[in-house]
Image: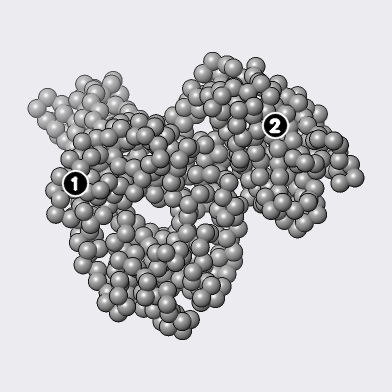
Amino acid sequence: MILAATFLDIIPFFMVLVLFVGTCLVSPLHDGPMYDSTAYTECKEEPEKPLYNGGVFESQPQSGGVQHAIALYAVNGPSFILHSLTQDTIYSFSIWVRIEGSSSGLIRASLQTENETYDCIGTVLAKSGCWSFLKGGFLLNWPSTSSMLFFQNTDGKDINIELASPSLQPFTKQQWRFNQEYLINTHRKQAVTIHVSDSNGKRMQGATINIEQISKDFPFGSSIAKTILGNMPYQNWFVKRFNAAVFENELKWYATEPDQGKVNYTISDQMLQFVRTNKIIARGHNIFWEDPKYTPAWARNLTGIQLQAAVDSRIQSLMNQYREEFIHWDVSNEMLHFDFYEKRLGPDATLHFFETAHKSDPLATLFMNDFNVVETCSDVNSTVDTYISRLRELQQNGVFMDGIGLESHFTVPNLPLMRAIIDKLATLNLPIWLTEVDISKTLDKDTQAIYLEQVLREGFSHPSVNGIMLWTALHPQGCYQMCLTDNDFRNLPSGDVVDKLLQEWQTGHAEGVTDEHGSYSIFGFLGEYRVTATYGNKTADTTFSLCGGRETKHVTISIRL
């Protein structure tokens, strides 16, 4: 039975569930736990069973396979006491939540240790009458003898919080990396077998096989600015590394129409010519920006009718200029945090933007792009459930919504929280991109590099992430938050990280000899390949694609002797 207390039941401090954590799952790497990406976004009549059978909660009483925790509303909300948490251990946490006393409420899980308070390790938009799934996690900077994990309503209103099926699963850093590599090997690579025969179909043992990856399937890129135009060292550096680009500011309304009626696409046209010439795909960023600070000054002073005419002109002009040129459009940027247009044009303004963009450029993927979705869960404007709720609201009103844009401007990344949030977003079955990845300039360059590698590995290893864009456009005075190189294109620590990962996440060149079956096999990253078979002084070649899937790709080459 689930126990829920009212105000009359308050005990002096709080009701806690005491757990000893330190000795759980300290196992060799190959025996470590496999990460469970299960997540739910629907509110259910009954909670599901806990992930990992509860992890360190496994020994707690269960009813029908579902563990129920006592939830008493008190000074700190319902709470657990956790003993012997260890430093540098990654903890994945999940629990089911139901509330009484309000139709809905944003519930935040926090962790307090002897040394510090982790303001948010997970959130859920909980409801009355059904169970909602909270998933998050944390990594401690110091070991903790005794910590309190507690739950509160973010708006401070008095409600009863009920909890069920708690799970806390520890991973060593080595186990976490093992899980990342497993996911990369199973979702970013595919097996291919090359068969070599003569013109009569006879197997050819001993043929030399050379395989070269000529392009990558996974889009990995960076923002660029007009500083790249005419700058051959910058262009050569960029093209050598990236297969995707996004214009930092040059497509934004204030850049293309700084004065009303004077539209100028000269710079963005030249930048588009650069990416086209080098066979680089580009994201369209952005059509509108809901932050009034980045709305053209002249547009901020327009009345409703005048502003409507101006936004109609903007979107028609932009779409006419760049129809089918960009793979994505960030339609109404940062709409979870700002509402300039909806305040002035009404609640259907965003709906109108998406409808018009889809009609004008139906093959482009339309994105809802915002910050503090994966970076933290402390921002009540952009928690994962807030994002999902807004997206579903637009979809229900007929918006053709295709993509999830996660800006990813990190300071100190919380990796299990980041992965948990992407798990929940992945249940929507929409493309997910990390669109503006960087690490805060408040940190030194070496620390930026460490955190950047963590974020990039987390993104690339998640099967539902379809692309990663860095926010590292280079200017004479530096970059927005983080640069990869200095002005002479000598790598900074973050640039070394990017180069290392680009090298790691490509097949490069493979060479071997066919076996007695006339075959040679490799396990390659997804993308396009060229293969050459040589037997004696005869050669033959072909190309093939690795597009994903668990089935082995088979390629046959015939050599005429």
Q: CA distance from mark 1 to mark 2?
A: 51 Å
Tag 1: amino acid: Tyr
In the displayed structure, does residue 522 sit left or right of residue 169? left
**SS at mark 2?**
strand
Question: On the picture, is 440 further left or further right than 152?
Answer: left
Seen at 25% across and 39% down, the residue is: 485
Identify the residue at horizontal 45%, vertical 71% (top origin): 353
Within 10 angstroms of label 1, few (less than 14), some, or many (20 or more) residues?
some
State whether residue 327 is above or below residue 469: below
Q: Quadrant of the N terminus?
A: top right
Mark with earlier residue (1, 2) = 2
Residue marked by disc 1? 234
- Assign the C terminus to one quadrant of the image: top left
Q: Is residue 278 something one can see in this rendering?
A: yes
Spot occupied by residue 146 in the image (x, y as percentages of width and height)? 69, 24
Circle 2 residues within 10 Å: few <14, some 14–19, many ≥20: many
Q: Which residue is disc 2 drawn over? A: 148
